[in-house]
Image (spheres, rainbow, N blue to C red):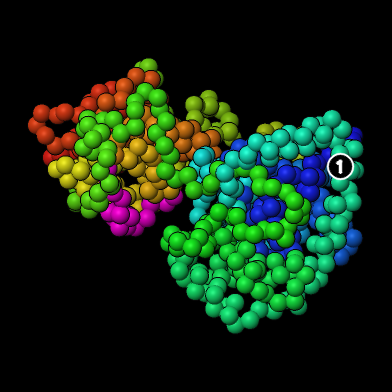
């Protein structure tokens, strides 16, 4: 079977910054790889796969491989497991290598890495930290080296990456704005030529590809001799501190990247140019303090990058990765329209309002309100299931909706039959007890919540919820909607001990993009459940209900509670109507005491 030709690395139009970052990760694999953040159709995957074709050969004369980690891969496929063919043929338990073993010395590529299930992320973190894959499973104890460059691509519109894995990427390139007409034409011509005759297209660029491979090999040989002056160390330390990075990984990575760039240029020592080129890629995903006005460390990935391949290439497009605030594009309502006239609330700048200690309303333990259309939520359905008898064999009971697929326990099966074949039955792994819980909060930060300190009370309620989630070791995510946009206030992760300081920094103002917020939340819930089928998500829409946007056609949010912050005796908001439209439970915030239940 003829191998499918990959689009040549040197033939990709533009993207000088991204190309240079990828090449530096080859010059010094200790950098930890590259995260490519950008919109769909911006050549992220094309460049990542093409990189494998220009890797220099290793000491044994073999070209390192590119191994792709699919989003739906099992843990056994990633780490390795029992060799079933050997077990069935000879009755012998032997380790079968997984993707991590195959990626050793090469590249591990993950497309849409921000959608990778948490279980696989945890395994990657362990191996990335130690460089060794240890497997204790199916009666096997096995360890093997697993050092690789991690190449990940993601579309920031589809959610954030877990901070622990994000920091493991040495460099992060956030692709720039959309290409111009001339660049689009050049891209189309290149793609047309490749599709017409892939083999001929690859052959036409073979000499240029080979020259790039030789240059990479020479840079690798030069790297150990590259030195840096004291000024370089001081600049790295000062700029890292100014960016507010946590820990020392940024400093170490910056130093390595600057040395790799100097080796790539053919220089003997690190110069200011090397530090400046790699700075945005090192700090883009690590800074906690906004860049200064001179643009240093902006994270745009638009450093000179001019020493990359194809100096004549022009930049190819992609949206900036910083997309935490999304415009309210719902055509049902003009921006800024809510219960207050645009001239009063919409035109005023955002106003800070500190939190007010407020308990979160007690929520129902039993069946929550059904989804729109009368379908009960998954949580409601699970609460009505008949109790399961302890000790009942899993393979005899009828599967229930939402149950994970049973997983055979091959080692237990071998032990039970003690070498006798054919096997009478398979033994299955015990299902995990309990299900992970995620609290998704939609916090109304529009201008109408500033009166009567409604926003401050709502912040206090969110903090109370976060503290209870922290005590229960549950996850939380908080989105703010106001100022005609949606902003991620707290990414999805284990609830922190204290969320109050972050909430107090959130200003209020502008209109109320309620429809966009609900639609965005529905997309997030669907994605999270694809990643973890057993995840329970409870959504809290905390609002004063002051919106003029139509409520028809809102997507259901499943297990959802609308918390009405409006405290007036005669309510002008539409909290109850919003709850009805979402098929959600309705709870007023005012006058309620904290409950133990979440």
494 in the magenta segment: yes
Q: In which quarter of the image is the C terminus?
A: top left
Judge by depth and name the residue closer to the eye, 529 or 183: 183
Left or right for 299, reference 463: right
Quarter holding residue 544: top left
- Residue 331 appears at what percent x and percent y? 40, 24
**Residue at the bottom extreme?**
230
- Residue 375 appears at what percent x and percent y? 39, 20
- Residue 376 appears at what percent x and percent y? 38, 23
Question: Looking at the image, is 383 positioned above or below residue 505?
Answer: above
Judge by depth and name the residue closer to the eye, 155 or 362: 155
In this picture, which residue range is highlighted in magenta?
493-509
Observer able to see residue 376? no
Question: Looking at the image, is 509 positioned above or below residue 21?
Answer: above
Q: Mark 1 points at which residue?
A: 202
Question: Looking at the image, is 50 positioned above or below residue 142?
Answer: above
**Residue at the left extreme?**
569
Residue shown at 43%/48% (left/top)?
Answer: 491
Disc 1 on helix, strand or loop? Answer: helix
Residue shown at 86%/42% (left/top)?
Answer: 202
Judge by depth and name the residue closer to the eye, 568 or 16: 16
**Residue at the top extreme?**
373
Residue shown at 67%/58% (left/top)?
Answer: 305
Question: Looking at the image, is 92 positioned above or below residue 26?
Answer: above
- Residue 2 appears at what percent x and percent y? 89, 36
């Amino acid at each position: 079977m003829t191998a499918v030709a990959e689009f040549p690395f040197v033939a990709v139009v533009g993207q000088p910054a991204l190309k240079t970052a990828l090449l530096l990760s080859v010059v010094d694999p200790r950098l930890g790889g590259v995260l490519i953040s950008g919109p769909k159709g911006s050549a992220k995957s094309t460049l990542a796969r093409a990189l494998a074709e220009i890797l220099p050969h290793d000491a044994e004369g073999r070209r390192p491989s590119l191994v792709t980690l699919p989003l739906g891969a099992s843990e056994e496929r990633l780490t390795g497991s029992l060799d079933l063919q050997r077990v069935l043929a000879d009755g012998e338990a032997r380790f079968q290598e997984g993707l991590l073993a195959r990626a050793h010395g090469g590249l591990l590529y993950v497309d849409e890495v921000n959608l990778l299930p948490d279980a696989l992320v945890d395994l990657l973190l362990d191996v990335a930290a130690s460089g060794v894959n240890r497997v204790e499973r199916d009666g096997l104890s096995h360890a093997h080296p697993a050092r690789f460059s991690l190449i990940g691509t993601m579309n920031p519109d589809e959610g954030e990456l877990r901070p622990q894995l994000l920091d493991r990427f040495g460099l992060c390139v956030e692709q720039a704005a959309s290409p111009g007409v001339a660049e689009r034409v050049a891209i189309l011509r290149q793609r047309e030529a490749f599709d017409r005759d892939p083999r001929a297209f690859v052959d036409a660029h073979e000499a240029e590809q080979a020259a790039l491979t030789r240059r990479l090999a020479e840079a690798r040989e030069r790297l150990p001799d590259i030195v840096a002056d004291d000024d370089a160390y001081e600049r790295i330390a000062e700029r890292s501190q100014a960016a507010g990075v946590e820990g020392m990984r940024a400093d170490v990575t910056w130093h390595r990247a600057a040395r790799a760039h100097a080796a790539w240029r053919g220089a003997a020592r690190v110069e200011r140019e090397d530090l400046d080129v790699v700075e945005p890629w090192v700090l883009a995903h690590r800074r906690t303090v906004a860049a200064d006005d001179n643009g240093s460390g902006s994270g745009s990935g638009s450093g000179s990058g001019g020493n990359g391949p194809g100096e004549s290439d022009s930049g190819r497009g992609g949206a900036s990765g910083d997309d935490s605030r999304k415009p309210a594009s719902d055509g049902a309502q003009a921006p800024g329209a809510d219960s207050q006239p645009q001239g009063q609330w919409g035109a005023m700048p955002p106003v800070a309002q500190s939190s007010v200690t407020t308990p979160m309303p007690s929520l129902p333990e039993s069946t929550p309100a059904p989804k729109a259309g009368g379908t009960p939520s998954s949580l409601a359905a699970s609460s009505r299931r008949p109790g399961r008898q302890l000790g009942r064999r899993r393979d005899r009971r009828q599967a229930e909706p939402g149950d994970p697929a049973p997983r055979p326990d091959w080692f237990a099966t071998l032990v039970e039959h003690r070498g006798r074949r054919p096997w009478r039955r398979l033994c299955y792994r015990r299902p995990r007890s309990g299900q992970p819980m995620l609290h998704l909060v939609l916090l109304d930060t529009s201008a109408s919540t500033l009166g009567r300190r409604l926003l401050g009370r709502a912040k206090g309620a969110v903090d109370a919820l976060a503290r209870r989630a922290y005590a229960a070791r549950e996850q939380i995510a908080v989105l703010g909607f106001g100022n005609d946009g949606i902003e991620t206030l707290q990414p999805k992760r284990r609830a922190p001990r204290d969320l109050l300081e972050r909430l107090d920094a959130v200003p209020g103002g502008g209109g109320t993009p309620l429809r966009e917020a609900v639609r965005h939340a529905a997309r997030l819930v669907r994605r999270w459940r694809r990643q973890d089928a057993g995840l329970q998500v409870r959504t809290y829409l905390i609002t004063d209900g002051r919106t003029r946007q139509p409520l028809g056609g809102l997507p259901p949010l499943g297990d959802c509670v609308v918390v009405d912050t409006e405290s007036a005796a005669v309510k002008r908001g539409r909290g109850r109507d919003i709850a009805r439209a979402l098929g959600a439970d309705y709870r007023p915030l005012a006058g309620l005491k904290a409950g133990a239940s979440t």
